[in-house]
Image (cartoon, rainbow, N blue to C red):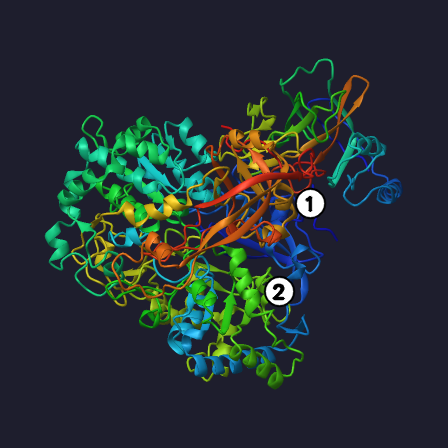
Amino acid sequence: MTNDYVPQDKIPLPPPDAEVRTTACDYCIVGCGYRVFTWPVGKEGGPRADQNALGMDMPTRTFQGWISPNQHNVTLIDGKRHHVVVQPDPNATVVNRQGNHSIRGGTLALKVYNPDGPTRDRLQSPLLRVNGELTPVSWDTALDIMARVSRHVIDTYGEAAWAMKTFSYQYFENTYAISKLAFRSIVTPAYSPHDKPGPGADTAGLDDSGINPFSASYEDWSEADVIFLSGTDPFESKTIVFTEWMMKGNTDKKLIFALPRRTTGVAWAEQHGGILLQLIPGSDTVLQLAIARIILENGWEDSEFIGKWVANAWEIDAGMGRGTRNTPWQWRTTWGKLGSGIEEYREWLFEQPHAELDRAAEITGVPADLIVRAAEMLAKPVDGVRPKASFGLEKGNYWSNNYGNTASFAALALICGAGNRPGQVVSRLGGHQRGWIGAASYPIDKSPNRLPGRRRQEIDLDRWVESGNVRFAWVIGTTWINAMAASHELHDTFHRMTRRNEHQLTTTDVDQAAATLIARADSGGMVVAVQDIYLQSPIGDELADIVLPASTWGENDFARCNGERRLRLYSKFNDPPGDSRPDWWIIAQFARKMGFEGYDWQDSNQVFEEAARSSRGGVLDYFPLVRYAQSQGRRAHDVLRDMGTTGIQTPVRMVNGELVGTKRLHDSTLELGTPEGPTVHRKWLTHFHTHSGKAVLNKSPWEWFSDFYERITPTGDELWMTNGRINELWQSAYDDSRKPYITQRWPDNYVEIHPNDAEPRGIESGDEVIMESDDILVQTGGFTIVKGDEFLFSKMEENGLIRSGKGHSKAVAIVTDAVRPGLLFTNFIYSPGWPETESNSLIHRVPDPITNRYRFKLGKAKIRKTGESPYKDSFESMTFKSRNII
Amino acid sequence: MSQENPTSAGGPIEWTENPAECDALSELLEHRMSRRRFLFIGAATVATVTLANLIPDTLFQAEVAAYEGVKIGSIQDLALAQPQEFRYPWDDANCISYLIKLGVPAGGGVGPDKDIVAFNAICPHMGFPLLGQFKSEHQVMGPCPSHLSTYDLTRHGMVVAGHATEGLPQVMLETRGDDIYAVGVMGLIYGFSNNEAAPV
């Protein structure tokens, strides 16, 4: 048995009577459609069409579909060994038409539990850390201990001492159960999703402009004439949106990338008339304002659209915009002070010195002529016809200057007439799929975070932990520490509060174990329970006191939406390993032990049907589907199953007794008629998401960010260190590290460095390098800010709320001119090498004060060579060839 | 076992599979090699011993059906960066392959400079032909015109960037004097369920 890659030259074919089910990919936002064949080991289909379940003669031909060796695995079904093939659905008519796929989804079969394969280390039993060793215990033992400690912590220290850190995306059934427990039963403010310090909007500037971040349909990217893509190359991290939609459709389409790297997608775009605005990380606001200014100076704005669809000052201030209500929009925009009509926005923009072309070129590092060219491509009419411009953004944009970037992005898009028409849309391109159904609202009234003017803000959970306020933490499906900022510093806090505490378990006896952990909490320490599919470092293998084994994709029926709100059933096809259970089941057992009501679900369909009520009226509304199923005497999961890989786009509506999906939001071309049955018609289906139905232009003050930006700008021998995903790897590599085919390609962490930076440091491709810094900033305390400007970084520094910490990350160097000089680019979270490959240790833990979002893309480091990797001169593993050959 | 296996390069060829010989060879190889060394399983013949010797220090292992060699070219006639097309192991559209002199040493490379390689030319992502996609300055095949997958021909056809769920299948070579012989294929050829099974 080996985890090394062994290319195969044959695969077993599913016989004609193999079971076939549909599912969608477990990974990125795009959620491609797949079909899963299973059949008992010992049987095999043949190469003729009538001998196999594909109904195809071998060999198949171009685009007909095929089963590659890495799409096959062996798993357990009803305890017996079965072949499993997970194949991109060649019959797909949406998303990944004809079975198009990425390398990530294409190798889904390799993630499947195989007791004899690299996935054999799946967690299979609850574990308790007794005398330092993780020891198997029963579900009752583990959950009884958790419930007793939880009860004590809540009764003694309040709900805010009881914390949860969970995925926000891993299926409606699970997130509904999690949010029901956290926000309805326990009602704790100490909650945060996997990728941020607290709940709330990711792209608040879009929300505050009335634009839903997932309003577009994939078809829109296909139909556009020009797309402004900021902070992402979809080729790399949401591949099928790029290869199936952006590369296809309107053949005259031009792509404008605002990225610090010339990636594969960029190279293709440049070959097809597009351009790269290769900006310095963090300067997006300036770039976007400069482009907007050129458009307005030349009168290229879409005046007809603005007149009809952008709110004027009166519509905002008179309560007809978002209204003077007590909402996140008001809290972020200092009670509406940012919103402006077009005239006021123009006046403000023209007063901003950094939005002037030459100054903008200096700050962004983008040549002035390219900034002008971008403005022309986006908005200059050709023969009297405006280009259809669409705008897509992702984390390179909003994980730096979060509010400023997203607000100025939205404003630029609106000026160009985008946001509510086919081919003229504004959307995130997405990271994870849309898998969150909140059973109740986040209890923001209990959050310790307050901004000036009694404005409320969700908790910064990391700071809350570091301040010693959390006594019990339940971590579900995330590495927490590795995924957050200044992670080595955060790890030190966790380690001190758990492993270095004197109260450690010496027995699996429930009474004694609970007493010990309660003593831990009472001594100022923290008890950590971790629920996951693998034992992750360090949260599981080092810090957890209790480990709970979760079952996952393929092991239960689940549902969720992709990046165009397409809801599908993810079918169960194999056994969960050992005693592992779906997250909703674990939550339910715990909740019942706590004495909470409403957790009597018998299967995941019951959770799905209950959760529909919470989806009602929202963007992910599938309530009509559940009602329709009930009217047919069927289970909602089964109705969704019938829809296969096509599924249905939410919000689901009922028209003439049939279920109908919604292609795009804010769709000015959509004719709704009268709502039918359980259908809810929200105004934002056909208008922007504001009271007036018109979008809002929001100013984006550079000075809210510039003091922090100046402080963290590399000096001397330091370089910017930014991060992201690469096509072949998904997330923390939790699955990829168990896919030999992938680890052959990426056996280690990597960092891209420009030749200008590599040469003087004596670094060549294949060298082992270390990035390090002892100037990683960490915000401490400061939960309640009273005076007007004290939320600004410079004031926090003055007030002693900022300290410096350390971080380092090792990697294999890739010398390439794809990155701009002065910049390092590395994996965003490469957990297999924790703590040595932890680039997030070099990220400042000072969130955007307006939105409480980390500036993950703005790290810095010094880099030096430490040796040569085994891959430097080997033919077998890793490659250093340029990724942008076109 | 004997089976017709026509190729465009050398007409029908035959290969034999002698189980006893195969077992003995496997034992010999397993005994000699660490598990990370080249591993040949399947229709092994005497030729495999020669093959293994071609890549003495490799860390790579693979299951490769080795066939009796088919002459596909000669060292003398092969110009730098001028791919020569052939079909192997079957006379089938999916078996279009290129014999290429890269100019730099490569995994599985033969010839005096270890720089002569051969690869199947059908993109293992979705079966699109990679004809004319060899980029000599980078020693890569691709990007595939369809979805932009690119393959490193110095590293056994590994995906550089892209979507294929296996590398570009490498046609294993050996030299006999000046002649270059194709003797096996590493990796399943697009569309096939078994490299050894004749196309339907």
Assess disc 2: are there few (<14), some (14-19) or many (≥20) residues with their C-alpha within 10 Å of its C-alpha: some
The structure residue drawn at horizontal position 88% and vertical position 42%, both measured from the top left corner, is B28
Which x, y percent locates residue B67? 78, 32
Describe the element under mark 2 as helix, strand or loop: helix
Q: Amino acid at mark 2?
A: Glu
Task: Left or right? Give the position of B121 relative to A238.
Answer: right
The structure residue drawn at horizontal position 29% and vertical position 60%, both measured from the top left corner, is A653
Describe the element under mark 1 as helix, strand or loop: loop
Residues flagged by tags 1 and 2 on a common chain: yes
Label 1 or label 2, whichever lies nearer to me, is: 2
Q: Which residue is mark 2?
A: A542
From the viewer's perspective, is residue A765 above or below residue A607? above
Q: Which mark is residue B49?
A: none
How far is the residue under mark 1 from the one under mark 2? 29 Å
Q: Which quadrant of the structure image shows residue A38?
A: bottom right
Q: Amino acid at mark 1?
A: Tyr
Task: Left or right? Give the position of A390 relative to A91.
Answer: left
Which x, y percent locates residue B157? 64, 33
Q: Which mark is residue A5?
A: 1
Front residue of A364/A870: it is A364
Mark 2, chain letter?
A
Front residue of A408/A426: it is A408
Which x, y percent locates residue A308? 14, 46
Residue A767 visible in the picture: yes
